[in-house]
Image (cartoon, rainbow, N blue to C red):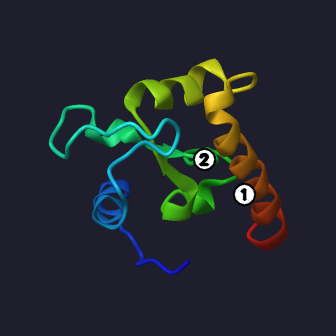
Amino acid sequence: EEYPEFKGEREMFEWMWEQLPHISMVSGLPLHPQGHFQWHWQFAHVLGAKGSVYSKWRLNPNNVWLMLPDEHHTFDNRGIDGRPEFEKLKNFREEMKHYYFNHVY
């Protein structure tokens, strides 16, 4: 999918906010509005972005899912294995890893 070249994450997040419905891609619940103190925590990199092998995709909106801050925290820190609400994200992450190593890395 085509997207503009971004200078930073905030610019990409703002672009995504204009393009996508403001609901969590994990739970389907409404997201916090822009301007909320946790607004930027609603953008989760599917494949780690900073200091990882996937850093080439840090500014790729296809590598970012919208989710509530507590869902983002669970994804980043608690793990998603055995959590049915994250099954779609888990499958997508595996597809992205496969694509990344076959076409980008």
Crowding at mark 1 (Cα within 10 Å: few <14, some 14-19, many 20+): some
The quarter of the picture where the C terminus appears is bottom right
Asked if residue 103 is positioned above or below residue 45 in the image, the reply reads below
Residue that appears at 20% across and 43% down: 33
Q: Residue furthest front?
A: 28
Residue 99 falls in image quadrant: bottom right
Q: Circle 2 sits on which residue?
A: 46
Asked if residue 52 is positioned above or below residue 58 in the image, the reply reads above
* Number of numbered markers: 2
Residue that appears at 75% across and 22% down: 82
Question: Which amino acid type is marked by label 1?
Answer: Met
User: Element at badge 2?
Assistant: loop
Percent x, y for residue 13?
A: 34, 56
Percent x, y for residue 101?
A: 82, 62
Percent x, y for residue 54?
A: 66, 54
Residue that appears at 44% across and 39% down: 67
Tell whether 70 sits left or right of 51. left
- Return the residue nearer the eye: 11 or 75: 75
Kindly report the distance in space between the C-alpha atoms of the residues bearing marks 1 and 2.
8 Å
Crowding at mark 2 (Cα within 10 Å: few <14, some 14-19, many 20+): many
* Residue 88 visible in the snapshot: yes
Q: Circle 1 sits on which residue?
A: 96
Asked if residue 95 is positioned above or below residue 86 in the image, the reply reads below
* Residue 60 visible in the snapshot: no
Percent x, y for residue 1?
A: 56, 77
Tell whether 48 sits left or right of 71. right
Residue 37 falls in image quadrant: top left
Residue that appears at 19% across and 46% down: 34
Question: Which callout, 1 or 2, points at the residue further toward the start of the chain?
Answer: 2
Question: Which amino acid type is marked by label 2?
Answer: Val
Q: Are marks 1 and 2 in contact (CB under 8 Å)?
A: yes
Q: Which mark is residue 55?
A: none
